[in-house]
């Protein structure tokens, strides 16, 4: 019994891990490809796996001055920066649109209902005050 429970929990954790990996793998592959493009544009040979120190040495040899390094870095990352800017703008537009739709569908009706309840309660209280006011003035006159 306990063994079956532990086994089922373990399997569900494995399944969740697999789903997470399946979701993240495309983004990691895309990021890896973009990094390889940037490194290649900076002057590194990325055709086969290399150590970080080898990549840095290659980049230094291709860019002996700080000015050359910054210019090549600017050129190498231009497309990537534009893609990131575009993606950020599109995500912002998507979430803004989604937030607007959620507001219209869920939040606004609740606010309207609360306002209507508050207004009707205020009207009821005002009517009670008006009903009480004449009887007090009438009671004071007697």
Image: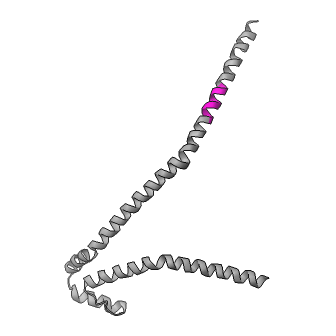
Q: Residue at x 36, y 61 (%)?
A: 89
Relative to residue 34, is residue 137 drawn left or right?
right
Relative to residue 84, is residue 24 drawn left or right?
right
Q: Quadrant of residue 79?
A: bottom left
Q: Is residue 120 magenta?
A: yes
Percent of width and height locating residue 19? 55, 77
**Residue situated in front as seen by the camera: 115 or 8:** 8
Instruction: Specify the farthest residue to the top.
Output: 142
Percent of width and height locating residue 62? 22, 87
Percent of width and height locating residue 44? 28, 88
Q: Residue at x 42, y 59 (%)?
A: 94
Q: How is the image coloured?
A: one colour
Instruction: Specify the farthest residue to the right.
Output: 1
**Residue situated in front as seen by the camera: 53 or 50:** 50
Q: Is residue 114 magenta?
A: no
Q: Residue at x 73, y 6 (%)?
A: 141
Indicate the quadrant containing the C terminus: top left, top right, bottom left or bottom right.
top right
Does 76 sit above or below residue 87? below
Relative to residue 73, is residue 89 drawn left or right?
right
Q: Quadrant of residue 8?
A: bottom right
Q: Residue at x 68, y 79 (%)?
A: 9
Marker count (numbered):
0
Prevailing secondary structure class for the magenta stretch in the rendered image: helix
Indicate the quadrant containing the N terminus: top left, top right, bottom left or bottom right.
bottom right
Relative to residue 114, is residue 63 drawn left or right?
left
Magenta segment range?
117-125
**Residue situated in front as seen by the camera: 87 or 131:** 87
């Amino acid at each position: 019994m306990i063994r079956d429970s532990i086994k089922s929990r373990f399997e569900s954790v494995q399944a969740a891990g697999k789903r997470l990996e399946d979701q993240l793998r495309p983004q990691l592959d895309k990021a890896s490809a973009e990094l390889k493009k940037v490194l290649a544009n900076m002057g590194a040979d990325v055709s086969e796996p290399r150590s970080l120190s080898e990549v840095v040495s290659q980049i230094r040899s291709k860019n002996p001055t700080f000015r050359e390094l910054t210019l090549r870095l600017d050129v190498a990352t231009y497309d990537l920066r534009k893609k990131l800017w575009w993606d950020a703008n599109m995500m912002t537009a998507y979430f803004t649109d989604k937030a607007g739709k959620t507001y219209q569908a869920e939040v606004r009706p609740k606010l309207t209902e609360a306002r209507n309840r508050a207004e009707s309660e205020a009207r009821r209280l005002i009517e009670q005050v008006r009903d009480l006011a004449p009887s007090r003035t009438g009671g004071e006159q007697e």
